[in-house]
C-alpha cells in the first residue's frame, strides 16, 4: 500500500536530488535544504493532504447543493472587518500589506458563509431563544463591555526621540503627522498612530495599566520591553454591564458558530466515507 508520505517522497525527492544547499551550520555540522524538506514531509504531509481533500470535498458538496452566500450577510461581514480599522485607507493599506484586495477578501468571506450554510443545512442547526437566554445568564459578567480608551500612539527607538516628540507636541505639532513620519509601529504608518477605542486588557500589561490610569487629553511617555512610546488618550468609555436585548443577536450568532464548528468534522467524515478517494502512484520515467 502506498502511503501519502511515500507518494510525496517519490514525487519530490528526484527533483531534490538535483540540487541541494546548506542552510545552517550547528557547531560545524550543516543542515541542508533537502533535509529540511524531508522533515517537513514526514511531519506534515498526511495532515496537509487530508486538509486539501476535505476542502475539495466541501467545495464539491457546496456546488452540488447550489449553495450561495447570502449577499446581505456578506456585505455585513466585510463591513465589520473594515470597521476594525480606524480609517478606510488603513483598511486598504493592511489588505495591500497581506497581498490581498477587497475582492479577494469578499471571495474568502463568501466561501466561509457558503460553508456555514452547508453545515447548517445538512445538520439542521438552529439556536433557540431559550439557549440564548441560558448562555447570557451563564456568561453575563464575561459579556459585559470593559472600559476603553481612544488611544493614539507613537513608538520610537530611543527616549531622546520620545522626548523630542513630546516637546514638539507641547509646541502645537500635529500628532498624526508626527506618527506617520517618525513612528516605527505599523499603526503610525497606517493611521497616524490612532488605535481607536481600545478595551482594557488588550494591550501588553506594562502598557495597559498606565494607559488606563491616564486622564482624557493627557500625553505621556512610557518605556516597555519593545521600545519607547508616546501615548495620548483622547476619550474614555466606562465599563457597561451586558444587556440581553442589545447582544442577543450577536450571542445567537456566536452559539450558532459553535454548533457549526462542532458539526463540521461530522459532515466531513460522512463526505469522506462516500467519496471515491484514490492516491495515484507516481509514474516511472
Image (spheres, helix red, strand yellow):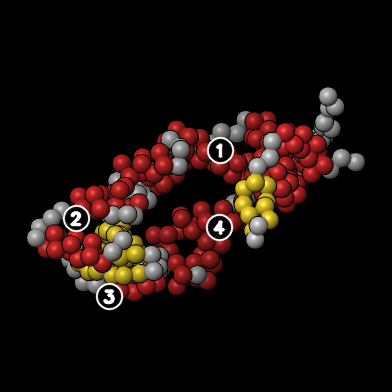
Residue 12 can be seen in this image: no
- Contact (CB < 8 A) between labels 4 and 2? no
Q: Quadrant of residue 275 in the image?
A: top right
Q: Quadrant of the C terminus?
A: top right
Mark 1 highlights which residue?
Answer: 111
Q: Quadrant of residue 119 in the image?
A: top right
Q: Residue 218 placed where, x, y %? A: 19, 68
Mark 4 highlights which residue?
Answer: 255
Mark 2 highlights which residue?
Answer: 175
Q: CA distance from mark 3 to mark 4?
A: 35 Å
Q: CA distance from mark 1 to mark 2?
A: 40 Å
Comparing labels 3 and 4, the label whose residue is closer to the camera? 3
Q: Residues within 10 Å of mark 3 (few under 14, many from 20)?
A: few
Comparing labels 1 and 2, the label whose residue is closer to the camera? 2
Q: Secondary structure at mark 3?
A: loop
Q: CA distance from mark 4 to mark 1?
A: 20 Å
The residue drawn where x is 62% and y is 52% is 24
Q: Secondary structure at mark 2?
A: helix
Which of 87/12 is in front? 12
Residue 35 can be seen in this image: yes
Sequence-wise, the earlier of marks 3 and 1 is: 1
Q: Quadrant of the N terminus?
A: top right
Comparing labels 3 and 2, the label whose residue is closer to the camera? 2
Amino acid at each position: 500500500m502506498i502511503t501519502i508520505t511515500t507518494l510525496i517522497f517519490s514525487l519530490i525527492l528526484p527533483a531534490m536530488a538535483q540540487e541541494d544547499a546548506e542552510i545552517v551550520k550547528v557547531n560545524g555540522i550543516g543542515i541542508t535544504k533537502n533535509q529540511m524538506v524531508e522533515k517537513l514531509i514526514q511531519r506534515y504531509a498526511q495532515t496537509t493532504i487530508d486538509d486539501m481533500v476535505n476542502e475539495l470535498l466541501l467545495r464539491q458538496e457546496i456546488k452540488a447543493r447550489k449553495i450561495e452566500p447570502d449577499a446581505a450577510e456578506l456585505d455585513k461581514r466585510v463591513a465589520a472587518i473594515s470597521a476594525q480599522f480606524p480609517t478606510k485607507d488603513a483598511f486598504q493599506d493592511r489588505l495591500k500589506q497581506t497581498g490581498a484586495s477587497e475582492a479577494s477578501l469578499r471571495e474568502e468571506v463568501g466561501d466561509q458563509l457558503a460553508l456555514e450554510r452547508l453545515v447548517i443545512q445538512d445538520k439542521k442547526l438552529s439556536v433557540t431563544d431559550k439557549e440564548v437566554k441560558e448562555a447570557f445568564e451563564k456568561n453575563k459578567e464575561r459579556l459585559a463591555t470593559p472600559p476603553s480608551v481612544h488611544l493614539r500612539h507613537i513608538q520610537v527607538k530611543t527616549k531622546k526621540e520620545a522626548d523630542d516628540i513630546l516637546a514638539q507636541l507641547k509646541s502645537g505639532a500635529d500628532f498624526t503627522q508626527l506618527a506617520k513620519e517618525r513612528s516605527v509601529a505599523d499603526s503610525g504608518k497606517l493611521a497616524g498612530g490612532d488605535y481607536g477605542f481600545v478595551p482594557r486588557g488588550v494591550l501588553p500589561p506594562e502598557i495597559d495599566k498606565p494607559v488606563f490610569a491616564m486622564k482624557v487629553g493627557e500625553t505621556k511617555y512610557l518605556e516597555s520591553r519593545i521600545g519607547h512610546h508616546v501615548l495620548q488618550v483622547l476619550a474614555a468609555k466606562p465599563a457597561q454591564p451586558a444587556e440581553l436585548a442589545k447582544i442577543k443577536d450577536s450571542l445567537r450568532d456566536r452559539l450558532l458558530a459553535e454548533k457549526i464548528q462542532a458539526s463540521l468534522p461530522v459532515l466531513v467524515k460522512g463526505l469522506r466515507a462516500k467519496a471515491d478517494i484514490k492516491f495515484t502512484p507516481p509514474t516511472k520515467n
